[in-house]
Each structure stands twice: as structure tokens, then as C-alpha cells.
Amino acid sequence: MAGRQLTWGLRSVNCEVTRWHQRAKRIPCEPVRRDAIAALRLKRPHLDGAALFSTIPRRRHLPLLQALVRYELILEFLDNLNERFVDFGLANARQLHVALVEAVDTGSPISDYYRYMPCCDDGGFLRSLVTACRDSCDALPGYRAVRAPIVREARLADVLPLNHEPDPTRRECLLRRWTAHYFGEDAGYRWFELSGAATSSLTLHMLLTQAAELPVDRPDLRRSHLTYFPDIALLSTMLDSYIDATSDIALNQHSYISHYAGTDNATRRLSELIAGTLADARSLHRGNRHAVIVAAMVALYLSDDNANMAHQHQYTVRLAKAGGALTRFLLPILRLWRAMYGLPSA
């Protein structure tokens, strides 16, 4: 996995980033252009993390890597747009996020994503990304067999606009209602855990890897889906919230991890998730590769400067311990990787 990622994966991601950066520089609307370039530059660790899933199949598969990176880039770009143009309202945000469904639903027509914000001209950037992602999906040999669960998973991205609702009371009401609609009132997880898991793209990334090979093993597909959602997806969202906790409070933005009663309780819950998801990942087909994905994700977040500030350090140590030897082994490597590439904190 390391050899494939270092000798092929990172280089291929760099080609994708270069291609879309050149495209982003031609976006006419200056704020939209800034958001597209920020998604490519500031969220580069997320793009590389998405590409790591391309190491799960037995062989290299360029369309898989491209689909992973392009989908993640769409998500990060829309997150930036949603945050910037929150005053345009929820209908606008949901219209933008239709792109995440259509990027993996190759049989559907392409919508007018800027229907409610016609003053913002991206020069066709988002439409080009969606089209390119669809082309990559079509090139996956097992895509047709996995298309239905992939599209269902993409539709959960409907929760993303709700996270940027500026009024905390209304935001919680919307998220609770959304969770009850999709998962019912008694799903075994708290409402913010399920809505938080739905914001993650990791389950969809895993489903794309299943489409990269034939034949598609249906029982393994179901086991993998149950392993990734909600636990692995929830872990990724909570770790992202963990490293952003200070800035989210300062900017009055939604913090998923703040729903736990204090940092000790949050750390205890995250430690349980880390240990549990690593064990569950190892039980899957090619389980060691899935375990590396989880450990690398944990190490990536914990290597962030924000996770090692004085008031966070003791909790970060506890989380790294929960990740076992593999996570602790990867931590200094990813800190060095961040320093070498000048990658900013998330």
C-alpha cells in the first residue's frame, strides 16, 4: 500500500490537482475562484486521503483514483461555497449539493447548480468536475453493480447544507429532523452521531473501491458498508471536529464534538471508536488494507498542529494510544509529510 501510494498515488493526485488548479484559475467570479483554489490547496490532505482508498484493490486503477479525488474535491469546493454564501439560504445550498449525487449517478441529467445564485459564474468549473467524476465512475468495471448503494450514499450529502445554518437552535432542529427522517428515532446512535457520520465521504469512497473489480462480492459489500457506516464515517467527522474545535468556537460555527458532555467524554467516545473500527476493519476482505486506511486517517488528523496545542495534547496522546502501534508508527511519518509539503492545519 505504501509503495503504491508513494510511487504512483501521490503523483497521480498531483496531476489531478494541477489539472483542476489550472481550470480553477479561469473561474470568472473572484470569490468562487478563491473557494475553488482553497479546496485544492488547503484541503490537499483530504484529497490524498481519498486517493489512499485506491490501494485497496489488487491492482492500480487510475479511473478509481480519479473518481475518489474528483468526488472529494467537489465536496470540499461545495463546503467552501456553502460557508461563504450561507445568506443565500437553504434552498440554494441544497441545489449546489445536488452535484454530489449527480457526480456518481451517471444516468441522471446534469442540473443547474447555481439556479439560486445566478450572479456567481464559475465558468463551468463545477459542471466539468461532475462530468469528469461521472466519466471515471463509468470506467469502473463493477460500477453498474454498485451504482445503487453509491447513489443512496451520495444522497446523504443532503445533510451538509444544514451544518452551515447560522442559528444554532434552528440548526439543531433541522439536523434532528433530518436524522429522524433518514434513520428513525431509535437507531442505536445519538442524532448528532448519525448526522455527523452522514457528512463523511469515507463510506462512498469504500463503495467506489468495490466497483473497481469484478465480480462484485455482494456479502462483502454489505459487510463493508456496515463497517464503514456509521462508525468509521462518524470517527472521521469527529476527528475533523476535534482538531477544529477551537476555531469553530471562535467563529461560532457548528462543532460536532461539542455535543459530547466535555472533552473527557468526547475523548473516551473517540477512543472507543478508534479501537472498535480498527478491529472491525481487519475482519473485512483485505482487512489489513482497510485497517491501514483507518489508522492513516487517525494519524493524519492527530498529526495536525491543532491536535498538539497545549490544551489538546493530553487528549491527543490518549487517542493515539487507542489507535495502537500502527497509528503511533504513522504519526511521525505524517508529521514529516505535512512539513515537507508545507501542508496547513485543517
Image: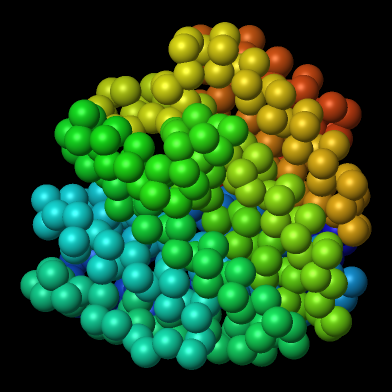
Question: For residue 221, what is the image quadrant?
Answer: bottom right
Asked whether, in this view, residue 333 is left or right of residue 76, the answer is: right
Identify the image's colour scheme: rainbow, by chain, secondary structure or one colour: rainbow
Asked whether, in this view, residue 226 is left or right of residue 255, the answer is: right
Question: For residue 192, what is the image quadrant?
Answer: top left
**Against 135, is 280 above or below?**
above
Q: Residue furthest left?
A: 119
Q: At 26% from the left edge and 49% from the top edge, which residue is drawn?
A: 83
Q: Position of residue 127 (x, y in %)?
A: 35, 82
For the image, the number of numbered tags is: 0
Q: At 66% from the left edge and 86% from the top edge, which residue is drawn?
A: 144
Q: At 19% from the left edge and 63% from the top edge, which residue is drawn?
A: 92
Q: Position of residue 219 (x, y in %)?
A: 83, 64
Asked whether, in this view, residue 160 is left or right of residue 268, the answer is: left
Front-lying residue, 64 or 161: 161
Front-lying residue, 8 or 286: 286
Query: From the image, which quarter does the N terminus lie in?
Result: bottom right
Q: Position of residue 319 (x, y in %)?
A: 69, 22
Q: Is residue 281 visible?
A: yes
Q: Is residue 330 visible?
A: no
Question: For residue 215, what is the image quadrant?
Answer: bottom right
Q: Position of residue 203 (x, y in %)?
A: 63, 56
**Against 264, is 331 above or below?**
below
Q: At 28% from the left edge and 67% from the top edge, which residue is drawn?
A: 96
